Amino acid sequence: MAKKEETELEHYTRELWDTIIRIIHGFRTGIAGGEDAEAAELTFSQIMLLMDLRRSGTSSMGELSRRLRINQGVATRMVDRLLEKGMVERERDTDDRRVVLVSATKKGSSIVQDVERLNREKMTELFKLVPKKERADLLALLKEIEKQFEKEGTP
């Protein structure tokens, strides 16, 4: 019996994972077909970094990598690419020259604001037909999963 339940759980998690990936792809495809061609050239990770900077303001590379749960090397490479596109600025902290500060430029903030708006509009459209109770249940479940990830120290 336990073997059958495990198989059903494995099937469920595989189906759930595939669905999550398709949903993320749907939002990325929406961005690519959206109003801002530059946003379509950003990776999902770059958009997440810009969203974080837009909400948090100027941050050190250490703070940024901790919030995004990536190592500083990965954060540095992402910032380098966004710097080339004119979407972030990088400067040394005046109090501690070892600390590198990063902030979104107006261009980067504007693009991520458009991406967030397009995604909110898409979600509103998708959830119009879903009953309020089911929406609340889904949000509660997702928040519970998020708590479990935080307990484990993963994103």
Image (cartoon, grey):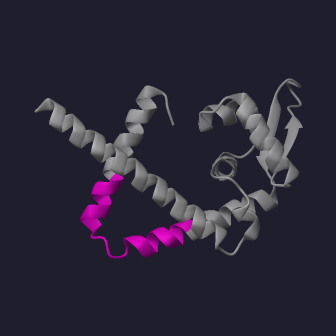
User: Given the current orientation, which residue lies at the most extreme left position?
Assistant: 1
Residue 69 position, x and y percent, is 59, 33
Q: For residue 59: magenta? A: no
Q: Main secondary structure of the magenta part?
A: helix
Position in image of residue 68 (x %, y %): 61, 38
Q: Is residue 40 left or right of residue 122?
A: right
Residue 103 is situated, as x and y percent measured from the top left of the image, at 78, 46
Give the number of callouts.
0
Q: What quarter of the picture does the N terminus occupy?
A: top left
Residue 24's place in the image compared with 145, above or below, is below
Nearer to me, 116 or 70: 70
Q: Is residue 60 visible?
A: no
Residue 14 location, quadrant: top left
> What's drawn in magenta, residue-wise?
119-139
Q: Residue at x 62, y 31 (%)?
A: 66
Which quarter of the picture shows residue 9? top left
User: Is residue 83 at all visible to an observer of this figure?
Assistant: yes
| Relative side of 10 to 19, left or right | left
Nearer to us in this view, 15 or 138: 15
Vertical side of 35 occupied by 54: above or below: above
| Residue pictured at 59% horizontal, 62% vertical | 28
**Where in the figure is residue 150, as x and y percent of width and height?**
45, 33
In the rendered structure, does residue 120 fall within the stretch colored magenta? yes
